[in-house]
């Protein structure tokens, strides 16, 4: 089985490293990644060559996803599977349904791990699947493969994913970015709770600002989640200032 990867950034490299154990992986990127690909043990090719694979996985910023669908819609083989890995789901699902031919199968996913948390293994991590247009047998084969590698599969809708992720991911990154902005750092005298906050900061600081912007901008539930959080912070601060219980 051949798997094509579009975009060879941090997450693309991580997934390629694990997939190469079970598939022939071919990657392409806007920049020359031949050296990194060779070191990882995967092939490089053109965008056209990558799109000829039975399974194609784009690793591009959320803001660039729809433009990529327009670019590759006529390059994909009939019956091939397009798998997205964006941290929001409604936008890529809508883009794939809008632009890809009906003979292209579609599976929306969100690996709930990254280059830092899954550096050693993916075992025990979660992955979200939002089946859009995919044969039952292929979907079951994919779930069996993921389970076999120790991943916990969560099957849901794009809407429910974005609703939940607006709290579990967006707020976590919002808190982490706030800690970065305040200059928070490890202290000689610190509590366990503070150490846990520093772990959030540690994860967030390795992710790009663009990812943070995109996960907020393209998740319709993010504004409300942030507003409620900020409102609660303000209310608690006001109680402290007024000496209320």
Image (cartoon, rainbow, N blue to C red):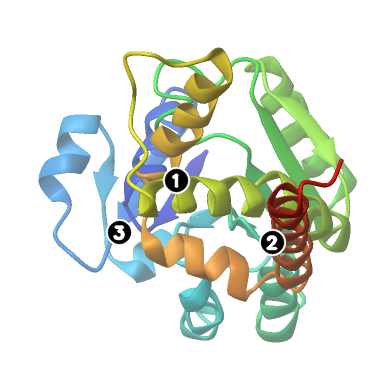
Using a 10 Å C-alpha cutoff, classify the residue at mark 3 as few (fewer than 14 neighbours), some (14 to 19) or many (20 or more): many
Coordinates of residue 234 in the picture (x, y in percent) = 70, 60
Coordinates of residue 130 in the picture (x, y in percent) = 80, 52
Give the side of residue 117 with respect to residue 37, left or right.
right
The quarter of the picture where residue 128 lies is top right
- Residue identified by numbered label 3: 28
Identified at 32% across, 51% down, the residue is: 9
The quarter of the picture where residue 97 lies is bottom right
Give the side of residue 197 with respect to residue 227, left or right.
left
- Residue identified by numbered label 1: 179
Identified at 34% across, 68% down, the residue is: 47
Q: Nearer the viewer, mark 3 or mark 1?
A: 1
- The answer to whether the residue labelled 3 contacts the one labelled 1, judged by CB atoms less than 8 Å apart, is no
Residue 230's tag is 2
Identified at 32% across, 45% down, the residue is: 183
Q: Quadrant of the C terminus?
A: top right
Coordinates of residue 19 in the picture (x, y in percent) = 47, 31
């Amino acid at each position: 089985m051949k798997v094509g990867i579009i975009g060879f950034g941090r997450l693309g490299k991580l997934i390629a490293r694990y997939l190469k154990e079970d598939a022939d992986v071919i990657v392409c990127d806007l920049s020359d990644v031949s050296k990194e690909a060779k070191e990882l043990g995967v092939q490089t090719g053109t965008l056209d060559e990558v799109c000829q694979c039975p399974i194609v996985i784009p690793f591009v910023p959320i803001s660039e996803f729809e433009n990529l669908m327009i670019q590759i819609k006529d390059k994909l083989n009939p019956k091939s599977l397009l798998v997205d890995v964006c941290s929001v789901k409604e936008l890529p699902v809508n883009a794939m349904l809008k632009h890809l031919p009906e003979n292209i199968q579609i599976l929306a996913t969100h690996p709930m791990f990254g280059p830092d948390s899954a550096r050693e293994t993916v075992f025990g991590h979660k992955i979200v699947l939002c089946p859009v247009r995919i044969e039952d047998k292929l979907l079951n084969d994919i779930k069996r493969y993921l389970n076999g590698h120790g991943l916990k599969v969560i099957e849901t809708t794009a809407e429910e994913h974005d609703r939940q992720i607006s709290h579990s991911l967006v707020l976590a990154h919002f808190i982490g970015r706030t800690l970065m902005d305040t200059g928070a750092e490890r202290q000689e005298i610190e509590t366990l709770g503070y150490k846990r906050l520093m772990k959030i900061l540690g994860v967030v600081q390795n992710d790009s600002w663009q990812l943070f912007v995109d996960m907020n901008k393209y998740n319709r539930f993010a504004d409300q989640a942030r507003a409620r959080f900020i409102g609660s912070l303000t209310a608690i601060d006001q109680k402290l200032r007024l000496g209320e219980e």
